[in-house]
Image (cartoon, grey):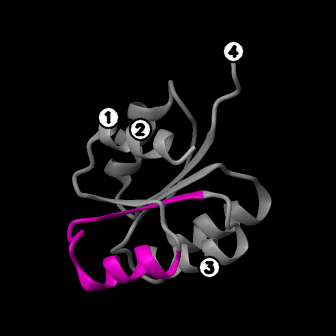
Amino acid sequence: MAEKKKLLYVDDEVANLNVFRIAFKRRYQVTTAGSAEEGMELLENEKYDVIVCDHRMPGMTGVEMLQIVSDKFPDMIKIIISEYVNDEIIRHAIKSYDLDGSMGKPWDAEELIAMIEKNN
């Protein structure tokens, strides 16, 4: 059996972290972080194939985090989650930081899996 992709999910809402872990643990090796800063620490110490990141978080936003991730880890699949997917900031980030996709909140597990696999 092929090794599971390593996926990092970043969101400041604990309930979302728990739901995500449950929804994706069979398909991916899931690690979660409760802030962009925590996510950056994890990225410095571990290699991930995919990052899915909420945009609106206290401190560093998801867009700010993914800008750094794009520079440091250009081959990683990068997806932003936001309640406001048509927001100008999100549209700009997708183009400027080579993001692989965006999805509204609440996210749909099957759509997110399709987005990840399409970019594999």
> Percent position (x, y) of residue 68?
62, 79
* Residue drawn at point x = 70 percent, y = 27 percent: 3
Q: Secondary structure at mark 4?
A: loop
Q: Position of residue 82 (x, y in %)?
A: 28, 66
Expressed as whole percent of the image width and height from the top left, the position of residue 40 reads 64, 70
Circle on res. 51: none
Crowding around mark 4 (Cα neighbors within 10 Å: few <14, some 14 to 19, many 20+) is: few
Relative to 80, 108 lies left or right: left
CA separation in Å, label 4 and label 1: 21 Å
Mark linked to residue 1:
4
Q: Name the quadrant containing residue 95.
A: bottom left
- Residue 97, compared with residue 80, is above or below; it is below
- The residue singled out by tag 1 in the image is 110
Whichever of labels 4 and 3 marks the residue nearer the N terminus, that label is 4
Closer-to-camera residue (96/31): 96
Distance between mark 4 and mark 2 Cα atoms: 18 Å
The answer to whether residue 3 is left or right of residue 50 is right
Q: Which residue in the protein does label 3 denote?
A: 68
Q: Is residue 90 magenta?
A: yes
Element type at marker 3? helix
